[in-house]
Amino acid sequence: MTDTTAARQTTGRNPAAPGSARTVASAVPAALVARLAKGVTATGEPDLVHTTAPLTGERLATLPRSTPADVEVAYQLARRAQKTWAALPVRHRQGVLLRFHDLLLKRQDEVLDLIQAETGKARLHAFEEVLAAALAARHYGRKTASYLRDRRRGGAVPVLTHTVEARRPKGVVGQISPWNYPLELSVGDALPAFAAGNAVVNKPDTQTALTALWARELLIEAGLPADLWQIVIGDGPVVGPEVVAHADYVSFTGSTRTGRDVAQRAAARLIGASLELGGKNALLVLEDADLDKAAEGAVRACFSSAGQLCISIERIYVHRSVAEEFLARFTARTAALRLGGGLAYGADMGSLVSERQLETVTRHVEEAVKAGATVLTGGRARPDLGPLFYEPTVLDGVTHEMAVCEEETFGPVVSVYRFDTEDEAVEAANSTPYGLNSSVWSRDARRGRAVAARLHTGTVNVNEAYAAAYGSVAAPMGGMGDSGLGRRHGSDGILRYTEAQTISTQRVMPLGPSFGLSDEKFAALFTTSLKALKVLRFK
């Protein structure tokens, strides 16, 4: 990478993290793979699919591939199970989630191994998935009855019309989940669907299917009926459309391009869909920011899970008066990050998940450097550590014609830009069609929140990278613009899996001429009544 090297200001390599005696092969033995593979709905002679461990490049698992006919069978099984499940008391369903919460925390080391083996991420970043899934399980395990309870609404005629809004499960939710957060974005999104009385047919990314299969096994141990969560595996263009074709509602997390296709297919069937899509997220460092905290937070924001996180930061806007001071702190911390793939805590960043991700990261950096950008730190692959490692990279001098400025990189690469005024920073941050997440740093929390309110993103973190907003599971999380539709978490996260039903009971008199009233007198009576209700401030 000669062009990149020539434009580099720091020449040191990121250090390697301490190794681990445990290997992927020992942590994910063939017997475990075979056991989990039994959870795949594949009814015929299996067409096998193979996955590879990103950390080593070695074969990880061989799994059965589901056919379109298998997807149909999965929906048949799920529909039968859903009817019985929906009839159970809400408190029973909540109990399953709370038992899952306890089992997950108790046996987290098992799934941490699987997540690392399938994604290549550092163990601390794998733990973020355990944390997020446990938060969702506890929240909906406690709050579902409140979210779903019948609510009195104002009737057509006060006193005479009794109206209730009820919530009914959609039926079977079709879920398509990605590879980057295989625990949180599979079971984490499925938990509120189950709590609301639905079944789920899930197509996880094949590369990370073992994690989803493990979560299903644990949830069954917690009391979920086995047929209620069906998992199908196969190529996205083949199996994905079949999942949408049979669903009563679709939950999708992935690229904006694929999300548009899912939305069109769902719309053609007149079913709802929630879509969490791409992002080109921005972090703003105001002139009054605590620069040490901002630099530390920016490292987490940009390089957690090697930047393969929908809500991670790919653009940093820093006030010109503090830019050099901030960059000195930020690049020093970035250059010191320890890279490694050991199945233990200790590495600050792991590897990318696939050759495709490595190619995108490499192309974005090399093209930017050739066009005049400067690598402040990083900017190179690290095959000495593993086939898919790439150093955390900070770019300066990036301009709009460079792909790294406009396109989602989805890797450990961030571009730095300077601004002079708050208005300029907000305008630049909002200059992308995406609108998923953003971060603002200021010593003045009130000022930080005021800037946050001007940013066109579904979540904004003030003096934090991304975890504050995402971890606030009672509040909605999702994107604006090209970053998606709908929300996970909070009331939105469970009510999306329900249909609203209005039940009104009319008492004493019908809503039509009665008691001998002519049409004219009925109209006059209701005209007078409407005027009176307005004066009395009825809503």
Image (spheres, grey):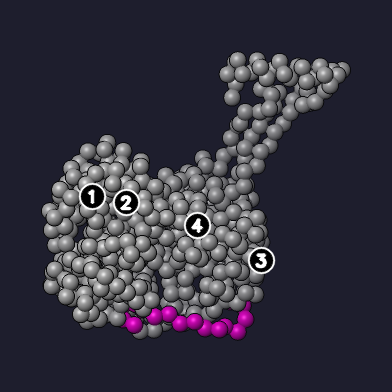
In the image, which is nearer the foreground, mark 3 or mark 4? 4
- Magenta region: which residues? 42-57
Q: How far apart are marks 2 and 3 (CA)?
A: 49 Å
Which mark sits nearer the N-terminus, 2 or 1? 1
What is the x, y in percent for residue 400?
32, 61
Question: Quick check: can you spot residue 46?
Answer: yes
Q: In this view, does 77 lie above or below 490?
A: below
Q: Do the residues labelled 2 and 1 touch (CB within 8 Å)?
A: yes
Which mark sits nearer the N-terminus, 4 or 1? 4
Q: How far apart are marks 3 and 4 (CA)?
A: 25 Å
Verify whether residue 55 appears in magenta.
yes
Q: Distance between the residues labelled 2 and 1?
A: 9 Å
Of the residues shown, which amino acid type is indicated by label 2? Ala
Label total for image: 4
To which residue does mark 2 refer? 428
**Residue under the image location 65 percent in, 70 percent down:** 72
Q: Is the magenta stretch mostly helix, strand or loop?
A: loop
| The one of 46 and 426 positioned closer to us in this rendering | 426
To which residue does mark 4 refer? 275
To which residue does mark 1 refer? 419
